[in-house]
Image (tube, rainbow, N blue to C red):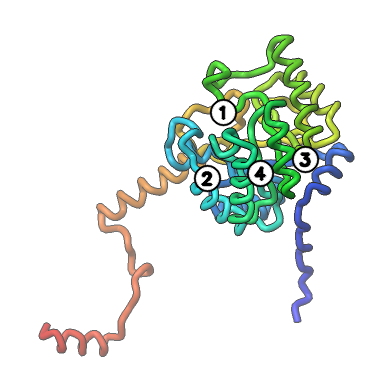
C-alpha cells in the first residue's frame, strides 16, 4: 500500500462558492475553454469558472464575429468542456437569436443548452430589457449570468468593438442595468470594456459576484479568452489582454521542424518504428516471392 500522501480532491465550484469568495474579498478566476483538453488543464490548475463562449466563432471557426455561432455548435463544444472540467462552474453562452425572439424560446433554448451538455448555467447579453427573460429562465431552474458593457452580439448597435460607459448617461445606465439584472435573478454579471471606476461602483453595490474583462481590477474576478492569454489567436487583440505565453509560436516552430525532418528523411528514426522478427520477415518475403 502506498504511503505517499494523496492530493486532496478539489471540491466542485458552486454559486455558493462564488458568493463566499465575494464576501471574503477573494478573487474569482474565470477563463474561456472550447475543447476537452483545455478544460482539463483549466480544471487542474483550479480555475473557478469556465465560459464556453460564443467567441469560439472567431477563435475556433474563423468567423468574423460571434453572430454565425449556432446553438448546436455551442452544445457540441460545451459537452467536451463539461467532460474535461467536472469541478469548475461551467457556463454556456447563449448564441445570437436564441433568446432575443421570445421569452418562451429563450427558456426552451437555455434548457437545450443545459440538458444537452450538463453546464451549470448560461450567459446572455443585455441590460434591463432582458430582465423578464432572465426571470423566466431562472424560474425554470437555470442559473443566469448577465453581460453588460461591450456586448459582442450587438456590437454594431454600440458603434463597433469599443469601450462603453464613458459618459454620464452611458455610465449611469450601466449601473442601473447591473442592479436590474441582479434583481431579475442573475447569479453573477460580466462587465466588458468599461471604465474601471464605473466597474468599481457596480461591484461595491452588487450583492452578486461581478466579473470583469477589460473592466479594471476592482471587480470580484477576471476573465480572459484563453486563446488570447496563451498567444494562440491571430486576430485583433484587445487593449485589456495580457499575453502570458506565445503558444502559437511554439506550435509553429514545432510544425516547421517536423516538415523539415520529413523532407530530409530525418523522421521517423529507428526508435519511432515497429520491428518484426528476422525469421518472420524472411517468411513474409518468401510468401511474396521476394
Distance in Å between CA atoms under marks 3 and 2 = 22 Å
SS assignment at label 1: helix
Residue 104, position as x, y percentages in the image: 63, 41
Residue 284, position as x, y percentages in the image: 20, 86
Q: Identify the residue shown where x is 75% and y is 82%.
A: 1
**Across the whole image, how many numbered discs are drawn on residues?**
4
Task: Give 135 or 79, whichever is nearer the viewer.
Answer: 135
Q: Which mark is residue 187?
A: 3
**Residue marked by disc 4:** 122
Residue 195, position as x, y percentages in the image: 71, 19
Mark found first going from the N terminus, 3 or 2: 2
Mark found first going from the N terminus, 4 or 1: 4
Distance in Å between CA atoms under marks 2 and 4 = 12 Å
- For label 3, count other residues whose C-alpha is less than 10 Å away and answer few (under 14), some (14-19) or many (20+): many
Mark found first going from the N terminus, 1 or 2: 2
Mark found first going from the N terminus, 1 or 3: 1
**Residue marked by disc 1:** 152
Mark found first going from the N terminus, 4 or 3: 4
SS assignment at label 4: strand
Distance in Å between CA atoms under marks 1 and 3 = 21 Å
Camera-side mark, 3 or 2: 2
The C terminus appears in which quarter of the rendering? Answer: bottom left
Distance in Å between CA atoms under marks 1 and 2 = 16 Å
Amino acid at each position: 500500500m502506498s504511503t505517499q500522501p494523496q492530493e486532496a480532491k478539489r471540491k466542485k465550484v458552486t454559486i455558493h462558492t462564488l458568493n463566499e469568495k465575494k464576501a471574503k474579498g477573494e478573487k474569482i478566476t474565470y477563463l474561456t475553454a472550447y475543447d476537452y483538453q483545455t478544460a482539463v488543464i483549466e480544471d487542474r490548475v483550479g480555475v473557478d469558472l469556465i465560459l464556453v463562449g460564443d467567441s469560439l466563432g472567431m477563435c475556433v471557426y474563423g468567423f468574423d464575429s460571434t453572430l454565425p455561432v449556432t446553438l448546436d455548435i455551442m452544445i457540441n463544444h460545451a459537452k467536451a468542456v463539461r467532460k474535461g472540467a467536472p469541478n469548475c462552474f461551467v457556463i454556456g453562452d447563449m448564441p445570437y437569436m436564441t433568446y432575443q425572439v421570445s421569452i418562451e424560446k429563450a427558456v426552451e433554448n437555455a434548457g437545450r443548452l443545459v440538458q444537452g451538455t450538463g453546464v451549470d448555467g448560461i450567459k446572455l447579453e443585455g441590460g434591463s430589457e432582458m430582465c423578464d427573460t432572465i426571470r423566466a429562465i431562472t424560474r425554470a431552474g437555470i442559473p443566469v449570468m448577465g453581460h453588460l458593457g461591450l456586448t459582442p452580439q450587438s456590437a454594431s448597435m454600440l458603434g463597433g468593438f469599443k469601450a462603453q460607459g464613458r459618459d454620464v448617461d452611458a455610465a449611469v445606465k450601466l449601473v442601473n442595468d447591473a442592479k436590474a439584472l441582479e434583481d431579475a435573478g442573475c447569479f453573477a454579471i460580466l462587465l466588458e470594456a468599461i471604465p474601471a471606476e464605473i466597474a468599481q461602483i457596480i461591484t461595491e453595490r452588487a450583492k452578486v459576484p461581478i466579473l470583469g474583462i477589460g473592466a479594471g481590477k476592482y471587480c470580484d474576478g477576471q476573465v480572459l479568452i484563453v486563446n488570447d492569454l496563451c498567444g494562440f489567436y491571430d486576430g485583433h487583440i484587445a487593449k485589456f489582454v495580457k499575453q502570458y505565453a506565445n503558444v502559437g509560436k511554439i506550435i509553429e516552430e514545432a510544425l516547421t521542424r517536423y516538415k523539415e525532418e520529413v523532407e530530409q528523411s530525418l523522421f521517423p528514426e529507428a526508435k519511432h518504428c515497429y520491428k518484426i522478427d528476422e525469421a518472420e520477415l524472411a517468411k513474409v518475403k518468401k510468401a511474396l516471392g521476394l
